[in-house]
């Protein structure tokens, strides 16, 4: 899958991100930037069928759905270590492990991009470590990136800084797309979007649903 340009990626996901994060304490900009980083602006095979995993969420022992074994790198003991995946999709985690896939290579498989976004929200809400780390108390996207890292979302030591830099580089693009979606301007919540309601948000949802159904 070819990567989207940053502005096209934001156009694709910002509306749906506003919708799924509304009322959760999660910034829609964080959803967009994190998924852009994890998928290389949509280039990763994880961003399309049959995987639909926009956020690099691993399939731990609690996951009962399908999994994919993909080559990945983790920062361990002061350095990066690579784990080679099998490239296969399995019906469940147990089947993957039985086939010889390393547990570090196992990622969740979703039914759609919309499902991936909803599960990202659910994953953060249901894991107490993110609440403890302050993810839902963050006053800005930068604070939320730092809290995600503190909660153990990723092993890379510069994860929060990298995401913050990407966000800052694309700040004006978010403003452009927000202007396209509605006349809502930045409010005192710290989010560019604030609380955006109405039919214009369905513009983003409609695009996502259309893709899911194809």
Image: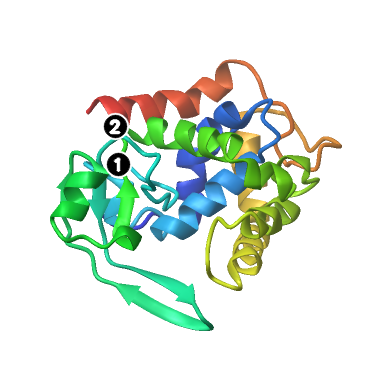
Binning the other alpha carbons within 10 Å of mark 1 as few (below 14), some (14 to 19) or many (20 upward) gives many
Is residue 5 visible in the rendered structure shown here? Answer: no
Mark 2: secondary structure? loop
Where, by quadrant of the figure, is residue 38 drawn?
Answer: bottom left
Mark 1: secondary structure? loop
For residue 180, the mark is: none
Residue pictured at 77% horizontal, 46% vertical? 138
**Image position, residue 58 (x, y; %):** 39, 51
Q: Quadrant of the C terminus?
A: top left
Residue pictured at 53% horizontal, 67% vertical? 155
**Image position, residue 67 (x, y; %):** 26, 45
Is residue 84 visible in the rendered structure shown here? Answer: yes
Q: Quadrant of the N terminus?
A: bottom left
Q: Is residue 108 left or right of residue 159?
A: left
Observer-nearest of 157 and 97: 97
**Image position, residue 189 (x, y; %):** 82, 37
Query: Decide: marks 1, 2 in contact (CB < 8 A)?
Result: no
Relative to 125, is 32 above or below? below
Binning the other alpha carbons within 10 Å of mark 2 as few (below 14), some (14 to 19) or many (20 upward) gives some
Q: Residue furthest top?
A: 198
Residue pictured at 72% horizontal, 27% vertical? 195
Mark 2 highlights which residue? Answer: 111
Residue pictured at 36% horizontal, 45% vertical? 53
**Image position, residue 213 (x, y; %):** 26, 24
Where, by quadrant of the figure, is residue 168 drawn?
Answer: bottom right
Q: In the rendered view, how is the structure colored? A: rainbow
Mark 1 highlights which residue? Answer: 109
Q: Is residue 47 left or right of residue 174?
A: left
Relative to 100, is 52 above or below? above
Observer-nearest of 101 and 121: 101
């Amino acid at each position: 899958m070819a990567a989207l340009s940053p502005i096209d990626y934001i156009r694709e996901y910002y509306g749906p991100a506003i919708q799924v994060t509304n009322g959760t304490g999660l910034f829609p900009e964080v959803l967009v930037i994190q998924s852009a980083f994890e998928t290389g602006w949509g280039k990763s095979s994880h961003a399309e069928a049959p995987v639909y995993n926009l956020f690099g969420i691993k399939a731990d022992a609690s996951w009962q759905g399908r999994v994919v074994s993909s080559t990945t790198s983790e920062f361990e003991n002061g350095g990066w270590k690579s784990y080679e995946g099998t490239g296969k999709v399995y019906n469940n985690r147990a089947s993957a492990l039985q086939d010889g896939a390393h547990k570090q290579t196992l990622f969740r498989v979703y039914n759609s991009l919309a499902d991936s976004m909803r599960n990202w929200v659910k994953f953060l809400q249901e894991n107490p470590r993110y609440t403890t780390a302050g993810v839902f108390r963050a006053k800005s996207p930068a604070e939320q990136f730092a809290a995600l890292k503190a909660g153990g979302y990723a092993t890379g030591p510069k994860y929060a800084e990298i995401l913050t830099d990407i966000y800052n580089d694309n700040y004006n693009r978010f403003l452009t797309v927000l202007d396209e979606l509605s006349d809502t301007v930045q409010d005192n919540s710290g989010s560019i979007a604030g609380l955006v309601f109405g039919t214009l948000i369905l513009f983003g949802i409609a695009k996502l649903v259309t893709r899911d159904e194809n």
